[in-house]
Amino acid sequence: MWFRSQAKEEKAEAVPPVTVESSQEPASTEKVEKVKTKATSGRDNQKYKFENQEYGKGPLVRAVVAAFVKKSPKTTLSILKKVFPDGLLHRYGVFQELKEAKKLSGTRDRYFMKPEQVIKLKDATIAVCNQWTSDNIQPFLVEAKRHFTIK
């Protein structure tokens, strides 16, 4: 008799885990959805208007530097470093000579280095950094707004 009641208990115990697992599936789905939402909501995709075009942060910096050079075609590396000093973006600088940019980038492109993206100065070829966030672009914007209108 003891075996029969134990067998009934074992059968009863075997059923609930199946029910528990199926009731947990929606909870885990909800958790995945929250993670996806959180990951996509943290990115700052703010656009800036410069010379009647909209730009993201990195492309804006590149466009401003290129416009400055176009406006003053005799600009040298040392003059441009005075206008947009490396201190405006710690670690990488606003721009670097192409060889230095390749060295600083390592295995990841941290500068705009495609042939159509590099900027030729009177005495050097430079690449503009693409490592801009909503916080670290603020000092650059202050300096850029001294020369151009940016909205």
Image (cartoon, helix red, strand yellow):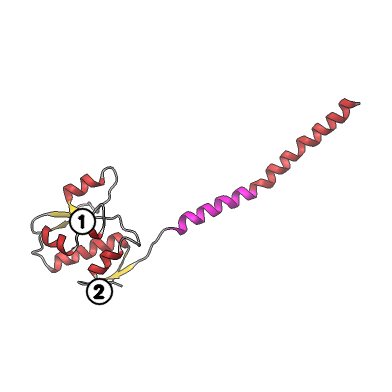
**Residue lying at 15% horizontally and 60% vertically, measured from the top left:** 81
Q: Which residues are magenta?
A: 26-42
The Cα–Cα distance between marks 1 and 2, rounded to whole angstroms, is: 21 Å
Neighbourhood count class around disc 2 (C-alpha, 10 Å): few under 14, some 14–19, many 20 upward: few
Report which quarter residue 20 is drawn in.
Answer: top right
| Pointers 1 and 2 in contact (C-beta within 8 Å) | no
Q: Nearer the viewer, residue 85 or 59?
A: 85
Q: Amino acid at mark 2?
A: Thr
* Quadrant position of the C terminus in the picture: bottom left
Say above or below: 81 vs 105: below
Say which element carries label 2. Answer: loop
Say which element carries label 1. Answer: strand
Say above or below: 60 vs 107: below
Q: Which residue is mark 2?
A: 149
Residue 90 in the image: state x and y as whole percent.
Answer: 26, 55
**Residue lying at 84% horizontally and 29% vertically, measured from the top left:** 6
Task: Pick whichever of labels 1 and 2 is earlier in the sequence.
Answer: 1
Residue 7 in the image: state x and y as whole percent.
Answer: 83, 29
Tell whether 65 sits left or right of 131: left
Q: Amino acid at mark 1?
A: Phe
Judged by its main secondary structure, the magenta piece is helix
Neighbourhood count class around disc 1 (C-alpha, 10 Å): few under 14, some 14–19, many 20 upward: many
Q: Which residue is mark 1?
A: 95
Residue 139 in the image: state x and y as whole percent.
Answer: 27, 64
